[in-house]
Image (cartoon, grey):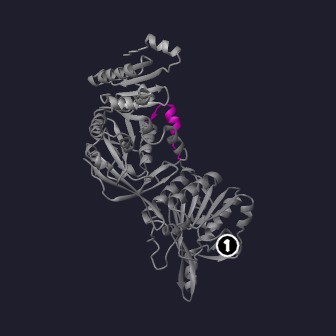
Amino acid sequence: MKTERKTESSIMNKSDNKILWELKLYVAGMTLRSQHAVQSVQNVCDKFLNGNYDLEVIDLYQQLHLAEKEQIVATPTLIKKAPPPVRRIIGDMSDTKRLVRGLDLQTEAAE
Amino acid sequence: MEGLNKSPTGITGFDQITGGGLPRGRPTLFCGGAGSGKTLFALEFLVSGAEKFDEPGVFMSFEESGKELVENTASLEFDLSSLVESEKIHIDQVRIDRSETREAGHYDLEGLFIRLGNAVDSAGAQRVVLDSLEALFSDLSDRSVIRSELRRLFLWLKERGLTAVITGEKGDGAMTRYGLEEYISDCVIYLDHRVDNQISTRRLRVVKYRGSEHDTNEFPFLIDSRGIIVFPVTEASLDYQGFREKLSSGVPELDDLLEGKGFYEGSSIIVSGTIGTGKTTLASHFADECCRRGEKCIYFAFEESPGQLFRNMESIGIDLKSWEKKGRLKVQAQRATVYGLESHLNRITRLVEEFSPRTVVFDTLSIFLEIGFQPEVQVMLVRLIDFLKEKGITSMLLLEMSPDRPERSSALNMSTMSDTWIVLRDQEAESELVRELYILKARGISHSRKLHRFELTNEGLKIFENGEKNRKQHYE
């Protein structure tokens, strides 16, 4: 399962020299918890990133080898690959404040 | 013990004390502090599985990286990298970088299960090591998750019929804190590494072994380049090629007492006697003869310097110094007390590897009793003799007996370790001391069973032709 979200605006903004956020969300099956996590991450991204992001949702059951390759232990795990620094957030993302803080978005929002 | 299927570890001595190894298809906990050898136990269990028992394995490390693990075991004779290459062992390094990880909401460890499951399936693994779980605990903050996920992990391992080794620290309460011991109810082993009076000792204790009789005693163990060896080891365990060639003792009359040709190649010969009975002289003849044949010998002198040895032997006509100059003889003098038993064992084996001698002499073994307790010394010696036999090296081991004890009651129970045992002694006869020699045993050789008189002359050790007769003559 892959939901890739590359909106028109992200491409536009990229050309506007805006940073593109690269996010990968690893889940173990599309359980309720996984769905919550996907929803929560999307909400936060929409709120803070103005469409400048790629969010890829990966079901580890479909790609077993990725668990080791991506150093996944807990699920769900969200990895922010770009912009640096790399961040990993584990949990169903129900704690939105922590998610926002974990992605270093709070400071950006304040700016 | 019957009915319980066991998975042999291949660790010398360990399978003996556990009646065949670890419980098959179940998790076993190895507890011990840093440096106690738990990772090595786990690793040897996995390596033996892959090499000897055709059971591939997965090593999931929460501490060292896979590369480090291979490097750290490079000093051992485990060929971990080739086992990894041939996919008989899969190493997965689990790393949680705390600095880049945050928690936001509820999670479980399904990612870890997928990861382990995939590794097990790809390798066709039957053995699993988790080293150590505490490292994982320290990286995650939600204790209730860890607790419930651990329970699930152990059930999962059991359901899949995996023989698993889980390592953990002992003493800091972590095991109890996470209730780990509860879940691993089948087999728990404690490892301990202490240093008392600068003597380092390692001990192992089987705390729990459900459904299997086990000894609750502490067993000493050692670690050397070939891995772990747990006492008791009754006898040199490996299969040796039949070395049928014979080597002269360097004393023709002594060879005569041993079917005329001397000792079997690759055998171990003990020469015992009280102080001043001529043990070093006999050993020097043996070394000298080896060098005369153009072969190499290492003489481990634990009680005197090479200079002293050379001088003493020169006075009875044995020129060891010239052999040293020619590179055939290596005299290695070292105070036994300077190193622990393990480092002694390692130094000796390393030197033997480097010099590749045909014979070695240990003058004397008794000195090791100063630096270790009897069981450890015994383990070390068995390991040493085992090593030498494997290489087909003939060894002469000198044993100093205390004069007030009967000759056979040595502090070390050496009889199983030796193929040949020669006893030297001083006997009072009228107003003088008479030197006597007899052969206590000689495996596979029909040897003389008589007492033979000998003397230390300026041409070395001379045995009288017919001991019995000479003795009688002497008494008359």
The residue carrying pointer 1 sits among few (fewer than 14), some (14 to 19) or many (20 or more) residues within 10 Å by Cα, namely few
Q: Reply above or below: B156 against B421.
A: above
Counting from the top left corner in percent of width and height, residue B195 is at 45, 63
Identify the residue shown where x is 50% and y is 35%. B83
- Asked whether, in this view, residue B195 is left or right of residue B363, the answer is left
Counting from the top left corner in percent of width and height, residue B415 is at 46, 63
- Asked whether, in this view, residue B133 is left or right of residue B380, the answer is left
- Identify the residue position indicated by label 1 in the image: B308
Q: Nearer the viewer, residue B120 or B332?
A: B120
Q: Reply above or below: B94 against B44.
A: above
Q: Residue furthest bottom?
A: B431
Any part of residue A71 in sight: no
Q: Is A82 covered by the magenta stretch?
A: no
Look at the numbered disc 1 and give the secondary structure of its residue. Answer: helix
Q: Reply above or below: A70 against B337.
A: above
Residue A66, quarter of the rendered image: top left
Q: Is B85 covered by the magenta stretch?
A: yes
Q: Amino acid at mark 1?
A: Gln
Identify the residue shown where x is 53% and y is 81%. B427
Any part of residue B406 in sight: yes
Residue B473, quarter of the rendered image: bottom right
Residue B55, quarter of the rendered image: top left
Q: Residue furthest top?
A: A8
Q: Which residues are magenta?
A: B76-93
Q: Nearer the viewer, residue B461 or A31?
A: A31
Counting from the top left corner in percent of width and height, residue B423 is at 52, 71
